Image: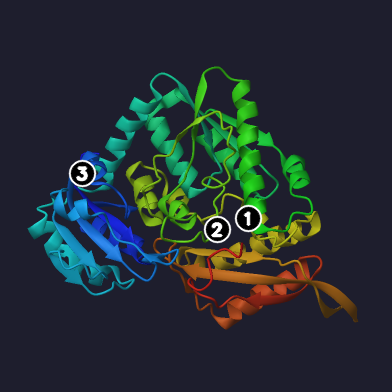
Amino acid sequence: MKQDMIVILDLGSHENTVLARAIRALGVYSEIYPHDITAAELKALPNVKGIVINGGPNHVVDGVSIDVLPEIYEEAGFPVMAAGHDKALCEVKLPQFTDDVEAIKEAVKSFVFDTCKAEANWNMTNFVNDQIELIRRQVGDRKVLLALSGGVDSSVVAALLLKAIGDKLVCVHVNHGLMRKGESEAVVEIFGKELKANLIYVDATDRFLSKLENVADPEQKRKIIGGEFIRVFEEEARKLDGIDFLGQGTIYPDIVESGTKTAKMVKSHHNVGGLPEDLQFELVEPLRQLFKDEVRACGVELGLPYEMVYRQPFPGPGLGVRCLGAITRDRLEAVRESDAILREEFQRAGLDKKVWQYFTVVPDFKSVGVRDNARSFDWPVIIRAVNTVDAMTATIEPVDWPILMKITDRILKEVKNVNRVCYDMSPKPNATIEWE
C-alpha cells in the first residue's frame, strides 16, 4: 500500500476502531496491531509514519498488566503518542478517547501531520488502485470463486474482482433458505442478467435447514452455516477448472468482533471464525481493513449503483440469526414475512433512506393472546431499527408512533402464528445490532 500509515497498538482500549476511523478521516491510513508487535515487524510494515499506543480498561490480561515491548520506544525509530496510557517515555499523552470522531480528529491532528509528517493521501481512488494491483499479484492467471450474497460487502468485492481479473471471477449465490423475501430472485436478476456476471445459482435450502435442525446455540449456528457455505463452494469448485481462491466480503468489524488479544469475542462471524480447518482455498479478502462506511465509499468509487451500495445490511448467516434459538420452518417464515412488511412500510415512510439497519426477529418462546375470539398461544415479533456509521456502536431510531402502529397491525393480521409485536430500545453497547 502506497499510502502513509499511522499504526495503532492495542493496549486494551475500547476505542481502537474509533481512533482508526478518525485518523483515516484526516486522510491518513491507519491500522490496528496487537500490543506485542516487535520493532522488526513494525519496520516491515509499509510507509509507517508514527505509532499511537492506545491504552484502556482491558490492559490487564490474565491478571497481568500488559505493555508494548520496550524496543518499540527504544529501537523502532517512529514518533510515539500515548492515548489513555501513562507511559512516561511517550512524546504526547492524551486523555482516554470517547466515540466522538471529530473530537479525536482534532486531538491527533498535530501528531499525525506536524510530528509524523504524514501526508493526507488515503482516499478511495488510491485504495481501489492498490487493491486491484494486490489482487492481480495474488491471483495471477488463476480463478476466484466468490460467495455472492448480493449484500453490500460481497457486491463491492465482486466489482473489485471484476475490475482486477475480469472473467477469471466465478460468482456463486447460495440460497441457504435463510434469505429475505425475494432476495435470491433479485440477486439472479441484477448480477446474472443485468451485470452479466458469471453467476452460478445453488438452492441448498433443505441441506442447510437439515444441518441446523435442533441447533439452538447462536455460535454453533454461525459455525454450521459458515462451514456448510465452504462445503458448497468446494463442491461447485470441483465442477470447474483452476479454482484456487475464495473471495469473501470480510470487513474490519468482523475481525474485531471475532476477538483480539485484549478483547474478548463478541460473536464469531461465518467468514472469520466458522471456516473449516481443511479449507482448500486461499482467501481473497480485499475489504478486510475497511469499516462499513468505507465499504460503501469504495462501492461508489467503483461505479456501483446507489441503491446497491446503500442497500439494507444483511448478516452472512441471514435470517438464521433472527430466528432465535433452534430454527423451525414455520418460525423462519414468520421472520421472513414480518421482515418484508417492515421493509415495505419503512420504504413508504421514507425511513429506508434514513435508518441504517432495520429488521425483525422471532424468539423461540410463545405467549398467550387472543385470535378470532379464542385463546391463542403464539410467538412475538420484535422490531429493531438502528443507526450507525461503522457498526461498532449504534443508536435507536425513534420511529413515529403511527408508523409503528401500522406495521404492528399488518404483522398481526398477515403473519401466521404471531400475536405480539415489540420494539427493541437497546443501543449498542450494551446490546449488539443483531440478537445472535
Please tell me whether mark 3 sits on a helix, a strand or a loop. Answer: loop
The residue identified by callout 1 is 219
The residue identified by callout 2 is 267
Q: Position of residue 422 (x, y in %)?
A: 66, 77
Category of crowding for the residue at label 3, using alpha-carbon neighbours closer than 10 angstroms: few (below 14), some (14–19), many (at least 20)? many
Instruction: Please tell me which residue is depicted at 36% across the width and 42% down the height of the picture.
Output: 303
Instruction: Please tell me which residue is depicted at 68% across the width and 50% down the height of the picture.
Output: 178
Identified by mark 3, the residue type is: Gln
Quarter of the C terminus within the rendering: bottom right
Q: Which is more N-terminal, label 1 or label 3?
A: 3
Please tell me whether mark 2 sits on a helix, a strand or a loop. Answer: loop
User: Does residue 42 appear in this view?
Assistant: yes
Category of crowding for the residue at label 1, using alpha-carbon neighbours closer than 10 angstroms: few (below 14), some (14–19), many (at least 20)? some
Q: Position of residue 41 (x, y in %)?
A: 26, 42
Q: Is residue 28 left or right of residue 139?
A: left
Give the CA distance from mark 3 to mark 2.
Answer: 32 Å
Mark 3 or 2: the one toward you: 2
Please tell me whether mark 1 sits on a helix, a strand or a loop. Answer: helix
The residue identified by callout 3 is 3
346 is higher (above) or lower (below) than 374: above
Tags 1 and 2 touching, CB below 8 Å: yes
Instruction: Please tell me which residue is depicted at 30% across the width and 66% down the height of the picture.
Output: 55
Point out the residue furthest to the front here: 64
Q: Which is more N-terminal, label 2 or label 1?
A: 1
Q: Is residue 201 left or right of residue 432?
A: right
Q: Is residue 105 left or right of residue 260?
A: left
Q: Quadrant of residue 239?
A: top right
Quarter of the N terminus within the rendering: top left
Identified by mark 1, the residue type is: Glu
Q: Quadrant of residue 216?
A: bottom right
